[in-house]
Amino acid sequence: MENKKQFQFKTNINCSGCVAAVKPHLDKLINSENWQVETTNKDKILSVITNEVLEEEIIKTVQKAGFKIEILKSNDVG
């Protein structure tokens, strides 16, 4: 079994339009079933589960799409 990690990031992705803007960038990097943004959370939490992508790659991808992002936490999920 491969070791997956869950990352959580604080972002400024704050509406469905913002999610739509970042979606093609993240979908190239990560399967769309493995990430989501909680736009109702005050910190606009982006959660990612992956065993292939590094934290730095996620950060660069979101920044390239024009959004702010910072790591909140990282956990092994199995």
Image (tube, helix red, strand yellow):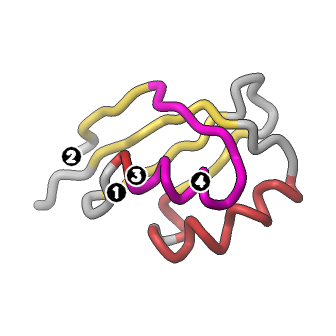
Q: Judge whether residue 54 is colored magenta.
A: no
User: Circle 3 sits in a helix, a strand or a loop, which is it?
Assistant: strand
Q: Earlier in the sequence, mark 2 or mark 1?
A: 1
- At a point 60% along the width and 69% down the height, the residue shown is 25
- Vertical side of 32 occupied by 15: above or below: above
Residue 49 position, x and y percent, is 40, 52
User: Circle 4 sits in a helix, a strand or a loop, which is it?
Assistant: helix
Q: Residues within 10 Å of mark 2 (few under 14, many from 20)?
A: few
**Residue under circle 2?**
78
Q: Amino acid at mark 2?
A: Gly
Q: Residues within 10 Å of mark 1 (few under 14, many from 20)?
A: some
User: Circle 2 sits in a helix, a strand or a loop, which is it?
Assistant: loop
Residue 41 position, x and y percent, is 74, 28
**Residue under circle 4?**
62
3D distance between C-alphas at marks 4 and 3: 15 Å
**2 or 1: mark nearer the eye:** 1
Q: Nearer the viewer, residue 70 or 64?
A: 64
**3 or 2: mark nearer the eye:** 3
**Residue under circle 3?**
49
3D distance between C-alphas at marks 3 and 1: 4 Å
Q: Is residue 42 left or right of residue 29?
A: right
Circles 3, 1 touching at the beta carbon (< 8 Å): yes
Q: Amino acid at mark 3?
A: Ile
